[in-house]
Image: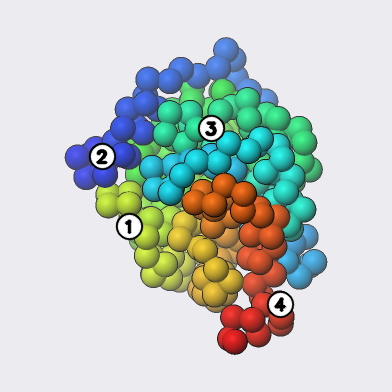
Amino acid sequence: MNSDTELAPAVRSILEAARERSGGDGVVDVDARSLPDALAAADADGRVPVIAEVKPTSPTADGTRADDPVELAEAMVAGGATAISVLTEPTHFGGSPEALARVREAVDVPVLRKDFVLDEAGMDVIEADLLLLIVRFVDDLEGLIAAARERGFQPLVEVHDRGELETALEAGAEIIGVNNRDLAKLEVDLETFESVAPEVPDDVTLIAESGISSPADVQRMRAAGADALLVGSAIMDHGAGDSDVTENTRRLVRAESTDARETEQT
């Protein structure tokens, strides 16, 4: 794990809170819904594969949305989302394992547990189809990937640069997310994905994360090689508490359609 001194204060606080949280009462056993199958179905249906994120708030959000997580997730699926990401970090993102459990019961698409999992105990909190592991924050990535798979999770391994990508590939990651947000400064740059993507093998499922807010951004990330996009803030639109989550999702899902391209050009 890289030194906490290199991280933004908000991120250091998130990690401190994660270290203090306990795991569950036993080892979970997940019968996971396949993300690769869901992505293939979306592509066949002419939809951009979007993993829409239920994120009540965050250190970088403009506000908070108190909508019911299930209603939000169902609205995202109605807008064409291929999968749902649910924040379970309570202190800084307003999430909870209970919210994820309710969402997963309500929708029929894969559900990602978005949290700061640092060890095996942190996995055994709630069942989900996918589990996030952030290269920068873990010491034994290979061991954690193996532990996640033993429980039935599909591990989504997050990287930010080519060095972390190499670590992820050596550890056996099959689903990799490239975070456009620099956790040292909390700044977003879509060129991050564009610089890392060419080094990712074709047989790895590649996801672009953070900073994707418009159909043009979607088209840019897809052109750079993204198999799917993880989008939170642009769909939740924290600054407008009554924003239409279904429509926010739909405009990104349809970003590669002829009508969407023509709209972007006018």
| Residue 145 visible to an observer of this rendering | no
Helix, strand or loop for disc 4: loop
Q: Residues within 10 Å of mark 3 (few under 14, many from 20)?
A: many
Q: Amino acid at mark 4?
A: Ser
Q: Distance of mark 1 from mark 4, alpha carbons?
A: 30 Å
Q: Amino acid at mark 2?
A: Pro
Helix, strand or loop for disc 3: loop
Q: Residue at x 49, y 51 (%)?
A: 239
Q: Position of residue 108 (x, y in %)?
A: 79, 43
Disc 4 designates what residue?
257
| Extreme-top residue of the structure | 25
Q: Residues within 10 Å of mark 2 (few under 14, many from 20)?
A: some
Q: Determine whether label 2 and label 3 are within 8 Å by CB.
A: no
Disc 1 designates what residue?
187
Q: Amino acid at mark 1?
A: Glu
- Badge number at residue 167: none
Q: Determine whether label 3 and label 1 are within 8 Å by CB.
A: no
Q: Distance of mark 2 from mark 4, alpha carbons?
A: 41 Å
| Residue 258 visible to an observer of this rendering | yes
Disc 2 designates what residue?
9
Q: Position of residue 53 (x, y in %)?
A: 59, 47
Q: Earlier in the sequence, mark 4 or mark 3?
A: 3
Q: Position of residue 3 (x, y in %)?
A: 22, 39
